[in-house]
Image: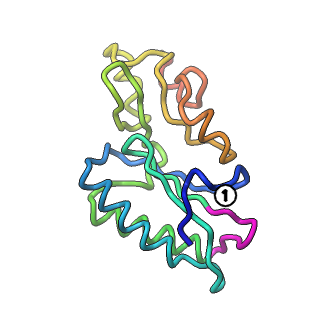
Amino acid sequence: MLVEFNQLPPHTRFWMFTSNRLLNQEELVYLNNELSLFIQKWTAHKQELNASFSVIDNAILVVGVDESQTGASGCSIDSMTKEITRLAQQMNIDWLNRFSIVIKSSEGNMAANANSLKELFLDGKINEETLVSNSLLSSFDELQTNLYLPIKDTWMNRYLAG
């Protein structure tokens, strides 16, 4: 069952996918429509999942399940991953590259690969205080407080050295 994303409880189980590029408005509408249809019929062992999703800053897809009533199963997680993969292929984006990040800079948000941080740093486009998406969130609550951190406070700080 599709529920409002902001109504999911703090204990929600979630998956976060970061795109290799920012999505445009047409892609956001398409993604919203397709994922809404998927989540409305998403089940685990024939039980409806109370779930939702949100696209943050045109690049970060978060899918959440309130497991207090029905928990996500291996098969249901596989079906979600297959749907994300199908949509990625149709939209020519990569949701599954763990080095994809979002950078918040004075020039606006940009999608990048963590491996490009050193070059951006040397070019003066970012600094150690630049906010980057945090892919190591451990709780749903952290989406509100720690989705973006200064590079110096993340595992990506090693890309700024040397």
User: What segment carries the magenta color?
Assistant: 65-74
Q: Quick one: which residue is furthest to the bottom in this view?
A: 46
Amino acid type shown at disc 1 = Arg
Q: Could you tell whether 108 is left or right of 1 in the image?
A: left
Q: Position of residue 22 (x, y in %)?
A: 32, 43
Name the secondary structure under disc 1.
Answer: strand
Depth check: give the residue in front, 54 or 90. Answer: 54
Residue displayed at 36% across by 15% down: 122
Q: Is residue 38 magenta?
A: no
Q: Is residue 70 magenta?
A: yes
Q: Position of residue 29 (x, y in %)?
A: 30, 58
Q: Position of residue 77 (x, y in %)?
A: 58, 70
Q: Position of residue 134 (x, y in %)?
A: 55, 37
Q: How many marks?
A: 1
Q: Residues within 10 Å of mark 1 (few under 14, many from 20)?
A: some
Residue corresponding to mark 1: 13
Residue displayed at 65% across by 82% down: 47
Q: Main secondary structure of the magenta part?
A: loop
Q: How is the image coloured?
A: rainbow
